[in-house]
Amino acid sequence: MEKTLSIIKPDAVKKNVVGKILSRFEDAGLRIAGTKMLSLSAEQAGEFYAIHKERPFFKDLVAFMTSGPVVVSVLEGNDAVALNRKLMGATNPKEAAPGTIRADFAESIDANAVHGSDSAENAAIEIKFFFPELSKCGCSCSH
Ligand code: GDP
């Protein structure tokens, strides 16, 4: 069993497709181990995306992620990290495979509907960021 972190971004929450996106996870065999709606502060969004701090789109990314509520979830299942990335589709919705969440619900590379951890190591860090109560240990494993 593996865990990963999903964020349904402000564009998808505004479009009223939270339930449809969560259903895609469940229909693919992932279990929702935790979920909540919240509004990110600029500080939280900046910390979460700190890896992109030097990128030209960082300011836009933080502004977008704080533009409305998001739904953060812990998804659990076999190969959860890779499976979620597959369900999401490519970062740029124009390049996302048909039937993926981004192909069906996203408009642009900024407003691209969902975030998903890109490795088990980052999943552990990201789960701890939003769900410290679900992180059993302080190491970089995906418990
Ligand atoms: P992801 O793992 O597929 O979400 O992609 P990344 O981790 O590479 O980037 C994080 C987020 O930054 C993406 O989901 C996009 O919303 C945004 N992003 C990435 N690359 C670009 C870009 O070239 N331009 C803009 N405007 N946003 C970008």
Image: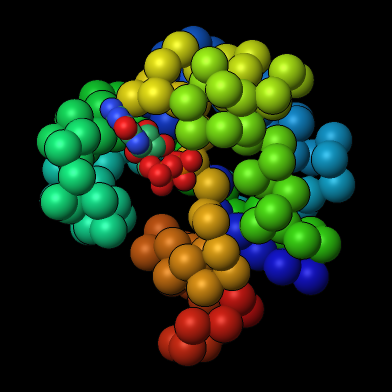
Q: Residue at x 48, y 26 (%)?
A: 92
| Residue at (47, 88) in percent of width and height | 139
Q: Which x, y percent locates residue 54? A: 15, 51
Q: Is residue 29 left or right of residue 88?
A: right
Do we see residue 66 in this rendering? Answer: no
Where's residue 59, x and y in %? 14, 36
Q: Quadrant of the C terminus?
A: bottom right
Image quadrant where residue 109 sits:
top left
In the rendered view, does 76 fall on the left or right side of 78?
left
- How was this image coloured? rainbow
Identify whether 97 is placed above or below 127. Answer: above
Can residue 102 be seen? yes
Q: Position of residue 133 (x, y in %)?
A: 49, 72
Residue at the limit of the structure toward the front, as seen here:
95
Q: Residue at x 20, y 34 (%)?
A: 57
In the rendered image, the quadrant that contains the N terminus is: bottom right
Nearer-the-camera pick, 119 or 123: 119
Placement of 1 over or under 43, stated as above or below: below
- Seen in the picture, residue 8 relative to 143 is either above or below; the reply is above
| Residue drawn where x is 64% and y is 45% of the image | 85
In the rendered view, tell whether residue 51 sits above or below residue 89. Answer: below
Which quarter is ligand 1 in?
top left
Where does residue 104 sit, x and y in percent of width and height? 64, 14
Count of numbered marks: 0
